[in-house]
Image: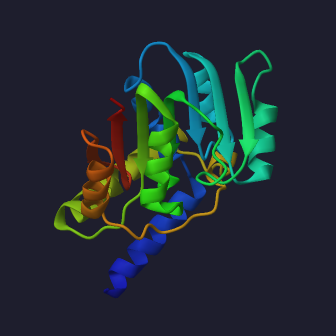
Amino acid sequence: MTRPLKRFLRALDRFHAERPWDHNAHYHPWILRQLPARFGSALDIGCGSGDLVRSLAVRGGTVRGVDSDAGIVERARKLTPPELPVSYAVGDAVKELPPGPYDVITCVAVLHHLPFREALEVFAERLAPGGTLVVVGCAREESAADYAYGLASLPANVVMALVRNKGRKVVRPASMTAPVRAPDMGFARIAGEARALLPGARLRRGLFWRYTLVWRKP
């Protein structure tokens, strides 16, 4: 890596550290568009501070959020109005997942923290027949297509940071305080294994270093 490129990347890191915005929350409206207008029950895996849970509750009969971080779950409870049909649980996203079945299961930027195949098998088991699984995930950059999406995300990321923060320096929101882990699977492998486990699943690369998966259980 050349010295000018290193300086550019350091400057970019400083810029985003001062003007953070939530890449995961950016996908929340897209997630809602993949779901029925009304559904009975939903489960958000890795719910964090509960932003998506509260959005799901507007359209669902009951919504449950689960996260392994007891502190962030307590914050989610405090941020959630008592009139919403929402509950939260602390637990492992695979071994301690609340029993279903659920009409909707969502999982945002969590799957790369979990054993991939086991997690998808458990999600599928908890999903009701006809239910919808929506995943927004992170993949390791490996192919030319991966790097192309990553490069396209750089200028878009700067624009979004300026627009969402109105050009100002801001404090990192609670929704962005979860531990970060680099993904160890590339998109091609993720897509191949997911389609084998979930026949008919739709996977797409997306901007901001994310991919999407939508599966409707027969």
In this rendering, is residue 148 above or below 49? below
Please state if 150 lies on the left or on the right of 173 as rendered: left
Query: Which residue sits at x=26%, y=46%?
Result: 204
Q: Is 91 in front, or is 157?
A: 91
Whole-percent x, y for residue 10 in the image = 47, 74
Query: Which residue sits at x=76%, y=32%?
Result: 79
- Residue 29 visible from this viewpoint: no
From the image, which quarter does the N terminus lie in?
bottom left
Query: Which residue sits at x=42%, y=37%?
Result: 134
Whole-percent x, y for residue 157 in the image = 40, 51
Q: Residue furthest left?
A: 144
Q: Is 218 in front, or is 160?
A: 218
Query: Which residue sits at x=63%, y=26%?
Result: 63
- Residue 13 visible from this viewpoint: yes
Q: Is 158 in front, or is 102?
A: 102
Residue 47 sits in which quadrant? top right
Q: Is 131 in front, or is 176?
A: 131
